[in-house]
Amino acid sequence: MSMTKTFPDYQQTNGWNALLSAREASPALQGDLTSDVLIIGAGWTGIAAAKRWQSLSPEANIVLIDASEIGEGNPGRNSGFLLEIALAEDANPDQLEKMNVCNRLTAATMADILAEIEDTGLPVDISKAGTYRAAASEAGLKSLNNYRAFLNTAGLEFQSLDRAALNSRIGSEFYQEGLYSPNCYLAQPAAAIRALASNLPDSVRLFENTPATRLTQRANGWQVQTPQGTITTHKLVLANNAFSKELGIARSRLVAMYTYAGLTPVLEKSVLDDLGSESNWGLLPTHRLGSTLRQTKDGRLMLRSMHGYEKESPRSEIEVGLKIRLQKRFPQLPSFELEHCWGGAVGFTYNGGAVWGEFKPGLFVSAGCNGGGTVKGTLLGKLLAEAAHGLKVPDVPELFGRASWMPPEPIRRLGFKLSSTIESHQGRHEL
């Protein structure tokens, strides 16, 4: 199996991580070792699984490996939204009881994340700034109204905003209508995942720059090949999202979707004064192919948009598309360049359901985040460790869905191109 397919090998550095001071990575694995538990993927899910496993089995020899470095890999490349309530894609006003359970679990997990970050004492930019959702067209308004119905039915706080109200807050007349929900934290994602990794128990051995390239089932467990060594383990946890399929797990249920982000330099005060009254805000699109926006505390604009199937696009192509989308939303901006521009792979499933549970004896998987891999991913990592210990846990497939089957290639790729073309046309005013 080709090593480069089992993990993302990004062309561009992560802009969030580039804003932080240098960090010394843990050494890569050299040679062979054995463990009781091996976790592949030191992100939100993998770190949560490692911590919970250690708390349940303090004597266990736990190894955690990651293909990249903490902060530079996928977990630090997202937009930094940590929601306390169900994602808009998960929300269903007709299934209130299930949504209430999801909301309670998500809120408790968010509280745990905050406590852990505070416990590290590290300076992490994270605050309860809430989040906007906004629609620019009829297609977006349909989704916005569904989410408003969910919030109403669940009795959750929100504010409805017309075009003028949105413009006064964020400085954009692009959207027809929106709503504001306070149940969201905005974070510097690379700083947050760095902090969580720094708080790993001493008994958990972390190896960075150590991708898993092949899995082999053994009589008493599993053997994992890495570029410069092997790990033989009794229990194996895959928390590497879409790249689980390249290790032979859930191939018919997972796709690696690349999304792209750009971050401006710190804007001049005169420019910021034209961008509304809010100085730290985030906006999520109502259409799943729409654009995510943020203004950071230090006065930058971030935009995340565009999609690529199983392959990262070149920077020149990404940068042009992101700048067009940013200027559509803020035509008052003077000519600008993006200081940072990067991509990130998202584990995508056809129906939005999760790939979760014990797939083979001693092999546990949590994948298919569908863009919600921070708080929900943390929760699913914790629950996976508990399930592996035989504890009673909430019914994850019932609450968050079970990933459905997708046809093999090349039908899958053709189907994605067709459906994305249709959706892009229907939601073209949201892009």
Image (tube, grey):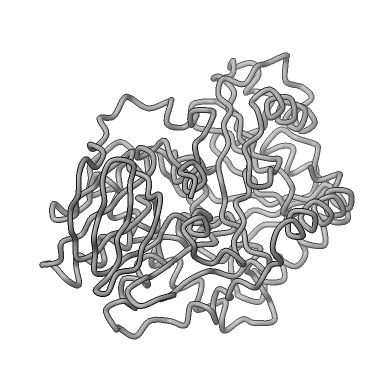
Q: Is residue 202 left or right of residue 159?
A: left
* Count of numbered tags: 0
Point 47% across, 82% down: residue = 395
**Of 72 and 86, which appears nearest the observer?**
72
**Of 408 and 7, which appears nearest the observer?**
408
* x and y, in percent, of residue 45 in the image: 39, 58
* x and y, in percent, of residue 334 in the image: 72, 15
Hey, which residue is sitting farthest left in the picture? 59
Q: In the picture shown, does residue 26 fall above or below 374?
A: above
Q: Image quadrant for the C terminus?
A: top right
Q: In the picture shown, does residue 276 fall above or below 349?
A: above
Point 72% across, 20% down: residue = 333
User: Within the image, what quadrant is residue 414 found in?
Assistant: bottom right
Q: Is residue 425 left or right of residue 55?
A: right
Q: In the picture shown, does residue 222 fall above or below 261?
A: below
Q: Is residue 11 left or right of residue 411?
A: left
**Of 20 and 205, which appears nearest the observer?**
205
* x and y, in percent, of residue 162 in the image: 79, 49
Point 54% across, 69% down: residue = 354
Point 19% across, 49% down: residue = 32
Q: In the picture shown, does residue 46 fall above or below 293?
A: below
* x and y, in percent, of residue 6 in the image: 47, 49
User: Within the image, what quadrant is residue 48 found in?
Assistant: bottom left
